[in-house]
Amino acid sequence: MAKHINELVASRRALLGGLAGLPLLNLAACATPGSAASTSADGFAPVAPTNADTLTLPSGYSWKTLIAWGDALFDGIPDAPDLDAMTRADQEQRFGQNNDMLALFAGEYAFPPPTTQDRLILCVNNEYASLELAYPALRSPYDVTASQIEALYASTGVSIVDIARDGAGWRVVKGDGASGRNRRITPFSPVVFTGPAARHPWIIAASAIVNAAEPAAADTTAHAVRCGTSANCAGGLTPWGTYLTAEENFDGLFVGALDTGAQFEDPALALDAASFGYPGVGFTDRTPRQFNIAENPRGPALYGWIVEIDPYDPSSTPKKRTALGRKKNECATTALAQDGRVVVYMGDDQRNEHVYKFVSRGRFDPSNRAANMDLLDDGQLYCAQCDEDGSGRWIAITLAAANTAAAALESPIRFHDEGDLLMRVRDAARFLGATPMDRPEDVEAICGANWRGLGPVLIACTNNSERGFEQPGNPRREDAERPHAAQSNLAGHILRFDETGGDCGAETFTWDIFAMGGDPNAESASMRTRGGGAPAFIATAYDGAPTISGDRFACPDNLFIDSTHRVWIATDGSDFVFEDCNDCVLVTPS
Ligand code: FEO
Ligand code: CA
């Protein structure tokens, strides 16, 4: 190699203007066999590859469980669940299943957020339900009862938990139900739809069916819909101290067969089902009727939103912010534009879907928390278009532009109003020229003091098992043995945007590849994957230059950029590519 890898990486990044503090990518986590002892970052040695069914940490670190599925959130009920006997009512007072995003809020709100506290609020997404976890005695999934299915639905959504630190470390603080902030929000909880699509005909029709199926609590908020939230993947925190939870794979909530009558009357419904892939497989005779697609054909319109929750007020009703568009939302990451407007970045995690950002019309007021509470109802939603020359633009998704683009493409689809545009925003983005991505998952902006975005934005494109050709921002690897055009992207990559002028409110950006998933030490450009299926291409070079050194990784999912601008990468599905190692967390050195 003519140049040292770090020199190559640094020079390629310098073309973009560079970024002080954005590290070179010498990754450390799940080492290549034989290299574990030779790589280290920030004082810890990488762990060796392992398939052990446990969490493996570097030497000198340990872990313990803070809270687990079924643990009581309130006094007055047994600490642990009664396995095989869990009911919906019981689950509604207990921690949910299958955690995805975790967020911590200071016990007392302040801006900027305090960095040390002994009391915190933990918000957790409970993405999906596992039958075998709740009902291990069940001999066959076919034996599941209606009551058990209802409890499983109630094990998804969001769990909010007070935690405190004392001499023994962090512990959960249970509430008595009347005080404290512990709370479950399930697919049966009341929520309110806000923003342009709040009165969309699909939402009105589906809400009536949901509310008829769900007995109302006496104190229900006006216009509340008891559809709650579910399929909660990642999300974000706002500077005003609210939690954004992103509804992702909601297609699996719905079972049964499509109502062809309803679809015939409204062809957009058929397109919607095809785009999101509902209904899933389940028991129509035992599933809550609002999730039976034949009985509630517009039910899926109630999901796929970003939901804003005030963790400081357990009596507050979560709000589904329709201005941010309906899709399979992976995340909702906020950064402030230079003028104080609020920017929310989102990835739509499905093959060939898009990256979005919302920019609020109003500005964040750090001195008045209440004044910020509805900032996410009014603003402009954009989709990202990457061009071949490394430039890119945020395309404003407007009613006029979307309908003009649809007509120009001779599509029969038209958007009736702003609400319809946001309900079917995937189609609008496609017409407007958004770049089809390799499953965009987490999007993270590098922020400076006071939540101000600095311009660089990282996007985890976890993989694309189908598309065999590249799109700008979604490269395919060089491989002498196989035609370039036939490669999929099983190992994924991380994309970098640099917002023009270092302003997250900008309408243009440049893009570059931050890291290609794969193995920088591999001897071959491809390898067999689990089960001997299609080969995974694992070269980590882009444009002739290596993008990473150190440890291998595949399928980047969630990202975190810490205060020293180290990038933490969590993988999901990496063990499909690298069979000898579980998923892992990697970090770039500071
Ligand atoms: Fe729920 Fe895209 O991961
Ligand atoms: Ca995820």
Image (spheres, helix red, strand yellow):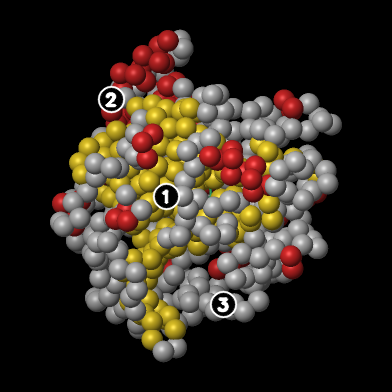
Mark sitting on residue 401: none
Mark sitting on residue 63: 3
Disc 3 C-beta below 8 A from ligand 2: no
Mark 3 or mark 2, earlier in chain: 3
Q: Amino acid at mark 3?
A: Trp
Which numbered disc, 1 or 2, marks the residue closer to the eye? 1
Residue 581 position within the rendered picture, expressed as x and y whole percent measured from the top left = 73, 60
- Would residue 290 be visible to someone looking at this image? no
Residue 164 position within the rendered picture, expressed as x and y whole percent measured from the top left = 36, 80
Residue drawn 52% across the image and 55% down it? 567
- Front-most of residues 160 and 355: 355
Residue drawn 48% across the image and 77% down it? 66
Disc 1 C-beta below 8 A from ligand 2: no
Counting other residues with Cα less than 10 Å from the Cα at mark 3, is it few (<14), some (14-19), or many (20 or more)? few
Residue drawn 38% across the image and 66% down it? 104
The residue that mark 1 highlights is 446
- Front-most of residues 395 and 208: 395
The residue that mark 2 highlights is 417
C-alpha distance separating marks 3 and 1: 28 Å
Mark 1 or mark 2, earlier in chain: 2
SS at circle 3: loop
Establish if 59 lies above or below 25. Answer: below
Q: Amino acid at mark 2?
A: Asp
- Front-most of residues 41 and 407: 41
Mark 3 or mark 1, earlier in chain: 3
